[in-house]
Amino acid sequence: MLQDRRTSRPTPVSSSLLDETEHRLRQEMTRVAGTLYASGGVLVLISLMALGDRTGSLVGVALVALSSIVFGVGLFLVGERFEVPASVHVLTSASGTAVVSVIVVLGGEPTAALFGIFYVYVAAFSFYYLSMSWALGEVALAGVGYAVALAVINLPGALGVWVLVMGASITAGALIGRLGQQQRSLAANLAAYDVARAAMLRIVSHDLRGPLGTIVGSADTLLQRLPQLSPAAVRDLVRAQQRQAQTSSTSSTTCSPPNASQPGS
């Protein structure tokens, strides 16, 4: 149901990192869905104050808008504390379609196109967070719901309005979904790069510990006992340092991190 985080990841990352990413994503989804519900309800109330008597059922639309605000605030608070399953987000998106359709019917002809713009919310959320198949299903459901709402109120020029609103919704949703894919790809590359860098540092530090210890020991011996050492002993110590330095150089040049793309590639 959710966008696949594994398709663009250049190297496997730890399961704990993947689980943490999914946990944060679902919390974010819940907060965003709550924000969309609440902000949509507020915008509907503002538009009602501007439209006044031209709204078909002023009280009905206001009640639905207020319910949307309450639901959105509650959903946002839930997202701050709990992880909501992906299936709930699919239902949340579908229920958003139903809410918009009800508002269109209650608002009547003067507000059919205006309130229909909220289908953009549904499309943007679906394309950004859900997989392509589920997003297309949600948009198809929105198209059917809007068509039914327009037929119920018998709006003149309903076909043109439907094409305009749904076309804008699909276009906006697809663009936002594309931006989401690029963002996730960059995040996956950065995560894999961090894992590869940490692995490389562990390998290098392990391989250099022995040679560096030998070099430090030889240097300490030279400093402490140089006057007592014969020229041959000094040469032996220097050669030992040279051998260990060559070993360290070879280790650092041959050691490479796991295959990972540089961030931003």
Image (cartoon, helix red, strand yellow):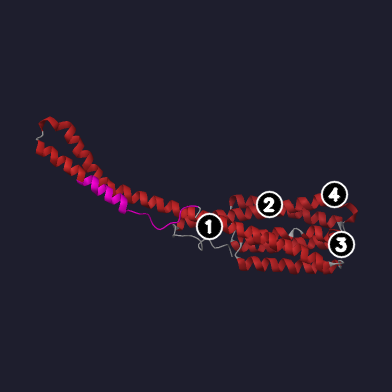
* Mark 2 lies on residue: 35
Asked whether the residues under the numbered discs 3 and 2 touch, taking CB atoms below 8 Å apart as contact, a structural biologist would say no
Residue wearing tag 3: 109
Query: What separation in Å lies between label 4 and label 2 (alpha carbons)?
Result: 21 Å
Distance of mark 3 from mark 2, alpha carbons? 27 Å
Q: Is residue 232 left or right of residue 142?
A: left
Furthest toward the right, the residue is: 53
Helix, strand or loop for disc 3: helix
Identify the amino acid type marked 1: Ser
Of the 4 image quadrants, the one containing the N terminus is bottom right
| Label 1 sits on residue | 185
Q: Whole-Å distance between the Cαs marked 3 and 1?
A: 44 Å
Q: Which tag is nearer the camera, tag 4 or tag 3?
A: 3
> Reading the chain from its start, which is encountered first: label 4 or label 2?
2
Across and down, in percent, residue 215 comes to 22, 41
Q: Earlier in the sequence, mark 1 or mark 4?
A: 4
Please provide the residue range marked out in magenta.
243-263
Q: Residues within 10 Å of mark 4 (few under 14, many from 20)?
A: few
Q: CA distance from mark 4 to mark 3?
A: 17 Å
Say left or right for 250 vs 31: left
Residue 261: % across, % down:
45, 56
